[in-house]
Image: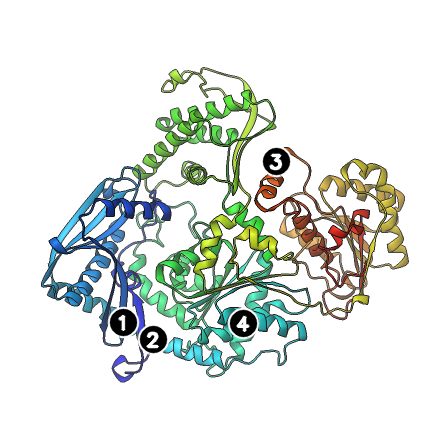
Amino acid sequence: MPDPASSPAWTYTVSVRSLCEFTAKQGSLDRRFTPSATALEGQAVQLAVLARRAEGYETELPLEGQFGNLRVRGRADGFEADVNRLEEIKTIRGPVALIPDNRRALHWAQLQTYGALIAADRGLEQLELALVYVDADTQQETVLRDTVTAAALQAAFEARCGAFEAWAAQEAAHRTARDAGLAALPFPLGELRPGQRVLAEAVYRAAVHDRCLLAQAPTGIGKTLGTLYPLLRAMPLRRLDKIGYMTCKGTGRIMALEALKALRDAMPGPGPDPGAPQGALRVLTLVSKEQACEHPDKACHGDACPLAHGFYDRLPQARADAVRQAWLDPAAQRRVALQHGICPYYLGQELLRWADVVVGDVHHAFDPHGQLYGLAQSQGWKLALLVDEAHNLVDRARDMYSAELSLARVREAVAAAPKALQPPLRRLAGELARLGRDQVEDYQPLAELPEPLAEALQRVNVALGEHVQNHPLEVGATLEFYFEVLALQRLLDRLDSHSLCDLQRSAGRVAVQDAPLNLSLLEDDTPVDTGEVRDVLLSVRNIVPGHFLKERFEGLSSVTLFSATLGPPDYPRDLLGLPENTAWIDVPAPFPAEHLSVRVASLSTRYEHREQSLDALVDVLASQYQQHPGNYLAFFSSFDYLDKAAARLALRQPGLPQWSQSRSMGEGARRAFLDRFVPDGRGIGFAVLGGAFAEGVDLPGTRLIGAFIATLGLPPVSPLQDQVRARLDAMFGADHGYADLVPGLQKVVQAAGRVLRSVDDRGWVWLLDQRYRRPEVRALLPGWWQL
């Protein structure tokens, strides 16, 4: 580690928050759930507090100070010069007494650091510090005050900086060496392939101009290296703090890590040895809490979990050991954490601050609670993202901003809840049951929640919030249910044209004993209505995630979304809320067109025609197989359709080998399905379009020589689908096909992409529906396909 005194050239800038988080946290981890305010609620509280302050009250004061080579900066919430008071405002929910001690100590450390900076800036001899906690629900302020001399504040500031200085010197040296290595980074495979070079140049241009890029690039050009390499080269030029490689599927993370290993090995200078050279690229793999938790039955609190006890006291040595290793996959994180007796998951969260490249699922960047994006904003990082298989992001983001609650789920919560929570839960169950009985159709869109249901849901949220506050170490069904209803309530509060609210009755039936429909008996345990009703599902379904993501894209340095099936470009631009200046590139296919024979069968796979066209469909499969024996995949829009086609083929061609994807396939069964595709093998594997075998599956050479695709991948006709189409047509126009044709054909092209995996492969794709000849359909298929 370099000596700061002997290295006068180094400089390091740190935010007040980061400085305090590094130096002020002590003792045990305390991550028990306490109801918190959303970012929007925090902004609203800030405005409300400002309105109550006197004229001349200063807000968002930019402050900066120097300690040796360390520069500290941040923004203080508010200063009232007339009374010489500096305020730090924190939005909370519930009593101040429930704020964990280590969190409150962190708040005081931040306020004291701001105090030192403003006292030095304005020549103040002493200062009143006010830590203001504001309840998001009641707007009530609780103010904790302390009057401190400027000398005491400066002494605390210098002590804090002194504790951080050695780490800052190490980080400055690492950053300098890292950037020098990346600036001279050669491409690890020697020469870029032609299509790969086109992609790499586009990614680099987008990064250096701080723009977003949509890159449609076919299989076989090396997209992973073709995106990581140029962004790493741009990292020192644009002074990026971090790169995030975000994936929609686990297979993408595996390929990203393989590419990053090759790139680290190619970096000039010291290699990535166990001594942790300062220039080694730090690569962190983010994992979910469920995957990393060693004690899932215990609360994240020092009194409950042994790996939480004394966490912050043992963290400094564990953190130092981890960054020396630099390659921080889940196994490395777990090994280091357990060596020091701390939680692997929260060690990974801490290492997020010190990594150069972060590999993880897209929810870390785009989910409302995504840790990567949240830290980037709070710490002021320059963060650039790569999003692999980005055609999945629309649906993944929709799921992130959707929530649902069924009557059956509420009844489960009633059964598991303590007695004190049962009355409000019964009321909620009763309101859901009543709506289910009263609605005429099984599917009912709602412009807003009926007032009795809205009130019942609110009461449940309040009751559960109070229970969780009073039982902070409790884990299990009640806490999980609270998370569900809280997420639903927050989405209902933001309901607008971007989402649908609806009530759907299902075929399943639910017992409603003890779910009172007589609201005058809500506090009574006496059953009022017994028997069974059909289950009811209340949903908020996001349709246009761009409403939530627009601000995220604007807050990032650059984002490249890439996939073999992104087009048409307006589709992701409109639905994801990408900036207007987002660039688009369609990388040419590396395959000669004659390597893929694309044929259209003259039959109809519309739902009403499927039975009568089934013989003709399986005859196409059999004829192709007889003329060109080998391994094929046959894709169908549902398991029901798949089962019927497989049975009909077996009846008409009993000697033709076949195997099928089944419902709820485990990992072993999926592997066994793919293992049937041996080189020069023969047979047809039946799979569901858009399922596990329709993308992310690599069967090169003669392991797969063709694919049959039945239907256009369109969603089934339903009242819900009608609502989705009407909403999207109203927002973007009726001729876009955003509700059905575009996403359907993306699935088709993804499935067809399983056939050619290298420039030497040859194969066949059969499109089993005459609608593929229509101009509006052909316009959405790859231009190099020769139909």
Q: Residues within 10 Å of mark 4 (few under 14, many from 20)?
A: some
Taking the spot 43% from the left edge, 16% from the top edge, the residue there is 518
Q: Residues within 10 Å of mark 2 (few under 14, many from 20)?
A: some
- Report, in whole angstroms, how far the alpha carbon at label 4 lies from the one at label 1: 31 Å
- Report, in whole angstroms, how far the alpha carbon at label 1 lies from the one at label 3: 55 Å
Q: Please determine whether, in this image, residue 636 is positioned above or below residue 151.
A: above
Viewer-nearest of discs 3 and 4: 4
User: Which residue carries the number 4 mark?
Assistant: 205
Inspect the image, locate mark 4, and give the three-letter code of the amino acid beneath it.
Arg
- Report, in whole angstroms, how far the alpha carbon at label 3 lies from the one at label 2: 56 Å
**SS class, disc 3:** helix
Taking the spot 22% from the left edge, 66% from the top edge, the residue there is 160
| Spot occupied by residue 727 in the image (x, y as percentages of width and height) | 58, 40
Colouring chosen for the image of the structure: rainbow
Q: Quadrant of residue 422?
A: top left
User: Which residue carries the number 2 mark?
Assistant: 170
Answer with mark 1 or mark 3, whichever residue precedes in sequence: 1
Whether residue 584 is visible here, answered yes or no, is yes
**SS class, disc 2:** helix
User: Which residue carries the number 3 mark?
Assistant: 720
| Spot occupied by residue 3 in the image (x, y as percentages of width and height) | 28, 81
Marks 3 & 2, CB-CB < 8 Å contact? no
Inspect the image, locate mark 1, and give the three-letter code of the amino acid beneath it.
Arg
Looking at the picture, tell me which residue is in the foreground, 643 or 611: 611
Q: Residues within 10 Å of mark 3 (few under 14, many from 20)?
A: some
Answer with mark 2 or mark 1, whichever residue precedes in sequence: 1
Viewer-nearest of discs 2 and 1: 1
